[in-house]
Image (cartoon, grey):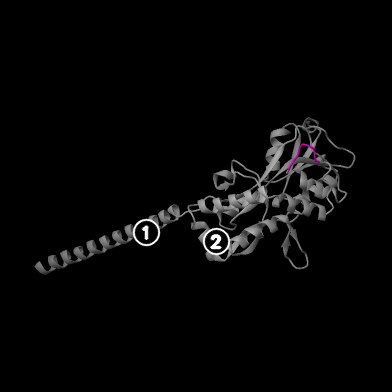
Amino acid sequence: MTNHKQSSRWRLTIMFKIVNILRASILGVGIFGMAQAGIAQDNPSAVIEEIRSSGELKIPVMIGEEPGYIKDPATGEWSGFYVDFLQDIADALGVELETVETTWGNLAADFQSNKIDIAIGVNPNPSRGLVVDYLWEPLFTDAWAVLTPDGAPVATWAELNTPEKTIVVQKGSTMQVVAEALLPKANITVVEDRNLAIMELQAQRADGILLAVFDALQISNLALGDVSVPEPMLLNPATLAVARKPGNAGYINFLTNWVQQQRSLGLAQGRLQKSWEDRGIDLSILPSSFSF
């Protein structure tokens, strides 16, 4: 009987020791995890170091978004002024570009899933701002325009804000936000990408497509409609965005300095001007007061 009690006590002692060891291990892992998070939080260059360590800068690219993103159908290679800008950033970081095909509406999800490290040409958006950090300094300034059927230009936004008008926008884009705010009486058709929007206009199912003016001019140059910049003119800041995460302060600082250099030295404006001229885009429609 005595041996039985001693054996029971021995087993209980061993069990308590195992439990304590497990508790200590779990606590240690928790402390280590918090320490690692603290290190990332305290190190403003953590994100830059992460990108450099991976050897690549993951960037979004999009079909049908020329001349910012241009895909060679023969080689699958990407070019365009957005890709050129991002190549500059990758070169400064000493890494290669890694392209990820996506859409404007998917950018927030792409950041959250770590598919991309940066987005360019984006507009500040409150809902995306919950998970994305935008640079305050825009790379350039655009304006909102409407691509209409040939011979049907519009002078004001009010002309489109009637139940008889149908306006097409891309899903999840700032264009959708603008249309729903400015044109509450109009019918808003939401499509996945620009090519589908053009098809709606060509099929005479829409009275206009809401676009950034430089995109609208690119499409109009292909004899696909007229471009109007309705009054009041609404400016459209095209900025950069990064994922909100610990250790991105240095990355944001680096990008802000890059943007300021691009703007102050006229590098961004020169590159954009050449890109549009190379594609035969006529900028004379822009109001004299407009400056990108």
Looking at this view, name the residue that lies furthest to the right: 151
Q: How many marks?
A: 2
Q: Is residue 88 magenta?
A: no
Q: Is residue 133 left or right of residue 32?
A: right
Residue occupying image coordinates x 26% and y 64%: 18
Q: Quadrant of residue 57?
A: bottom right
How far apart are the alpha carbons under marks 2 and 1? 23 Å
Q: Is residue 92 left or right of residue 210?
A: left
- In the rendered structure, which disc, 2 or 1, sits on the residue that comes first in sequence? 1
Residue occupying image coordinates x 80% and y 35%: 165
| SS at circle 2 | helix
What amino acid type is highlighted by mark number 1? Phe
Residue that carries the numbered disc 1 in the rendered image: 32
Q: Is residue 215 left or right of residue 37?
A: right
Q: Which residues are magenta?
A: 286-291
Residue that carries the numbered disc 2 in the rendered image: 51
Q: Is residue 222 visible?
A: yes
- Residue 229 position within the rendered picture, expressed as x and y whole percent measured from the top left: 79, 38
Q: Is residue 287 magenta?
A: yes
Q: Dot 2, crowdedness within 10 Å: few (<14), some or many (≥20)?
A: some
Vertical position of residue 186 compared to residue 35: above or below: above
What amino acid type is highlighted by mark number 2? Ile
The label on residue 159 is none
